Image (cartoon, rainbow, N blue to C red):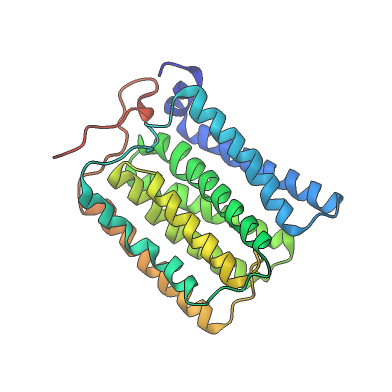
Amino acid sequence: MGNSLGDTSVRHPYSFVALLTVFIAAVYVLAGAVTDGMRLPEISLYFISNGILALAALILLARHGWWQPLGFVLDRRKRDFLFFILPLAPAVLNSLGGVHVASAADAALFLMLGLLIAFVEESFFRGFMLRPLALKGPWRAAIATSLIFGLMHSQHLLRGTDALTVLAQMGFAVSIGFTFSALVLRTGMIWPVMIIHFLTDFVGFMAAGDIALETYGPPSLVTIVIFVLVFAGYGVWLLSGGRLKYYRSGGPGSCLRPASAGP
């Protein structure tokens, strides 16, 4: 690429990721202040924050030509799509709860919010952050980005959500984030995990009829623990069970140049 931003992400990947993390946190704090100050509905916090972050992501992707390097590509090896079946389990489980939406307008809001969140979180955590860190090794990249992803969910504590519920969600976020990172590194594609992320959130919103986290009882906590173990194990298997298509080092901007894929 040869541009300053691409060079920075390669030469100083940890600083680059830290900068992105601070930026995301600052946007959420700003959105929370606006929501509280104007006494807006809680859903406004997520629309404001993810709207700003989506705009930032689109600017980065379009201006620097990062669409293809970050995984917005179609893999010709159809068997790679089989790796994305297991991560659909949370969406399927959420769908078993039925639909509890008060109106079509609420459903439309959930749809838009689900799309925003999926695009934003995957672009930043499995795109902008994962690729530079992959220069330091795929395991380090997957673990670091999943931990940051999980810690970002601690912001629910600031909204008064039950601490045990937030901790459970953070654990789930870390494990599913690890699997998503492993999938991107293994297949070279980011858009399938965006679709899975969207389906999980959207179906969950529709089943709950709200975006707020409900206090988890013992059955829900057991389910989450199972998912944490399953996805942690699946991510380990993905990273150790075959050739990865992560981005290799080789000069400025090389983290945005795909490695050659095996047959």
Q: Residue sitting at 32 percent across and 44 percent down?
A: 185
Q: Is residue 22 in view? A: no
For the N terminus, the quadrant is top left
Observer able to see residue 67: yes
In the image: residue 38, left or right of residue 226: right
Question: What residue do we see at 57% from left, 37% from top?
Answer: 20
In the image, is residue 115 above or below residue 219? above
Q: Residue furthest front?
A: 104
45 in relation to 250, above or below: below
At 53% from the left and 29% from the top, the residue drawn is 60
Q: Quadrant of the C terminus?
A: top left
Hey, which quadrant is residue 133 in on the image?
top left
| Residue 145, image x, y percentages | 46, 47
As drawn, the residue found furthest toward the bottom would be: 218
Q: Can you give x and y, in whole percent of width and height, for residue 168 in the image?
A: 55, 69
Q: Nearer the viewer, residue 40 or 111?
A: 111
In this rendering, the answer to whether 255 lies above or below 244 is above
Q: Position of residue 251 (x, y in %)?
A: 34, 20
On the image, the x and y values in percent for residue 59 come to: 56, 28
In the rendered view, does 150 fall on the left or right side of 92?
right
Instruction: Give the residue furthest to the right.
Output: 38
